[in-house]
Image (cartoon, rainbow, N blue to C red):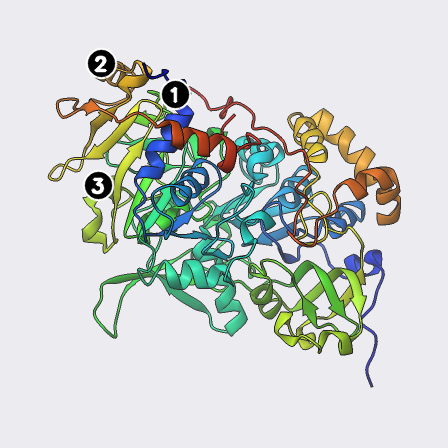
Amino acid sequence: MKTSKRMSLSEAVALIPDGATVVFGGWTVTRKPMAAVYEIIRQGKKNLHLVSNPGGPENDLLIGAGCIRLCETNYIGHEVLGHPYCFRRYYEKGGLDRTGYLHDDWTVQTGALRLLAGAMGVPFMPTLSLRGTDIINPEYDLLAPHRGKDPKVPRQKVQVMNDPFWGEGEVVLVPALKPDFAIIHVQMVGEEGTVRIYGGPFLDYYAAMAARTTIVTAEYITSEDYLRSQPELNVIPKEVVDVIVEVPFGAHPTTLAGMYDTDSAFFNEYVAASKSELAFKKWLSEWVLEIPDHMCYLEKLGVRRLLSLRADPALGYNAALKRRKKEPQEKTLATG
Amino acid sequence: MVKKLSYTPREAMAVSASRLIKNGDRVIVGTGLPLVAAILAKHTHARDAILIMEAGPYDGYPLALPSCVADPRGFYRVPLICDPVQLMGQFLQKGRIDVGFLGGAQIDKYGNVNSTCIGDYRHPQVRLEGSGGASDIAALARRFYIIIAHEARRLVERVDYLTSPGWQCYRDFSSRKLVRREELGLRGGPEAVVTTMGIMKFDQDTKEMYVAEYFAHLGITPDMIKENTGFKIDVSRAVPAEPPTGEELDILRTLVDPEGIFMN
């Protein structure tokens, strides 16, 4: 009766059609499913629609590689590791007609509530946030031309209404997120799909519940029986996990709690290259397009480099790691 | 004769910000100087402050400075790991967060903050990372503070994009008329702005920013603040700020950020 959920990374990513709505697990530069992201680029996916969660290198890379049509998100950046130059370039040139990229700004709380609504199967949630801000300014709704036409874009961005029950004033209704795919990288998954996450679970449970199809890449595929020995550490039920793939170092260069730390040197090179279209394309060829698969990526990184990132299990991170010092504050901020 | 301490404006800013946290405050912090200030406060006068990071760590007291709010360093030995639905949708929204700290690229005289873009939203000169949780924290924390470098291009008459609501913000977007945040049902509000030149506060009646304290110990004068502010700012109430102590600087340099993640 049971069919195996195991696939290779390329088989799993091949399930994602062009134009799909995708939510990634993790948080900015932590626990991002980077191996899957590289494979999405290698397979040349087009017109993807990314939703929610603070985005990190996965958003910047996919935008730069031309895979993305629109992002509904609250943040795209590499935190202290540098600015998201591909995102900047695509946004600053502006609009589908110029670069093919559209952007919709939200906040962490409303992104979380939108995923919660998706997970609950309700069409929207109320929030006390957003009032008074340009985030709900209709003139700044870049998706307006697509609302009511594209079935994957909510018919309107928000709806302000008065609390009909307690008379406590205005609330803002935000639409549910209904992603086609959730793609999540974790430390461990059972062979039937039960997910264990060490460190922060972030929004991954809600993403898996909200999505039609969930792909989990994991450092280890282990027995369900082993995961039952400490069920309190398991966070996503097997029934919402459709595909599992074993991908060691699958979050590199981002952090994976208890396993490996951020590869700051890798980020430095990426961020420097992403500052120009030409250098970015060269970087993309070298590290993604010309690399046949994830194992070759790990071979290119090399044993020494990978081992140097290993986390101390007592701390969850690598205390000996040389972390990058911050660039001078926002050099590119224009004087207006 | 006491040896004169030497320190940078950034260090003065971190120390001043840390002093705004009271012992027992429930503080939600973002990446960067807010994190530095909150951890410094925990090491000095506010040991019982509850340090919360929006990605999940609840009541953290990290051994090493987290480089972002999702860094495993921030999760070390916390009593509870939450998720953003809980922290931002429940704790923050229900009014269980006393203090929020925000950074940003621009702030205006009413304490509205922009962390989205410089220039017109549709065709900006520079696109920035975006709100993250800043807008939610500004709307829903019981009080909040802003940390920003003091430059005329950053302290502006009106922000290019209103990401996080201050004392007066928008109801009707087409007229761009400002209304008081209470009228929109928003809680709290910005109480102070810590800059590289001093501490700014907001007038009780007009809600406009004024200079409360200036870093005289760094050679800053009220006139210098006027020159480096992009709107007319009242300096009549300005007094010299209390300089950082040797102990605060020592803890900042040796315990909070010895690697120079955010302080260099």
Between label 1 and label 2, give the one nearer the viewer: 2
Q: Is residue A94 left or right of residue B116?
A: right
Reading the image, the residue beneath label 3 is B178
**Residue type at tag 1:** Gly
The chain ID associated with circle 3 is B
**Residue type at tag 2:** Asp
- In the displayed structure, B232 sits above or below B100; it is above
| Residue at image location 79% in from the left, 72% down from the top | A191
Q: Is residue B148 visible?
A: no
Check chain identity for marks 1 and 3: say if they share one. no
Mark earlier in primary sequence (2, 3)? 3
Residue in the foreground of this view, choosing between B186 and A143 = B186
Reading the image, the residue beneath label 2 is B223
- In the displayed structure, A74 sits above or below B154; it is below
| Residue at image location 51% in from the left, 32% down from the top | B254
- In the displayed structure, A130 sits above or below A2; it is above
Q: CA distance from mark 1 to mark 3?
A: 22 Å
On residue A336, the disc is 1
Q: CA distance from mark 1 to mark 2?
A: 22 Å
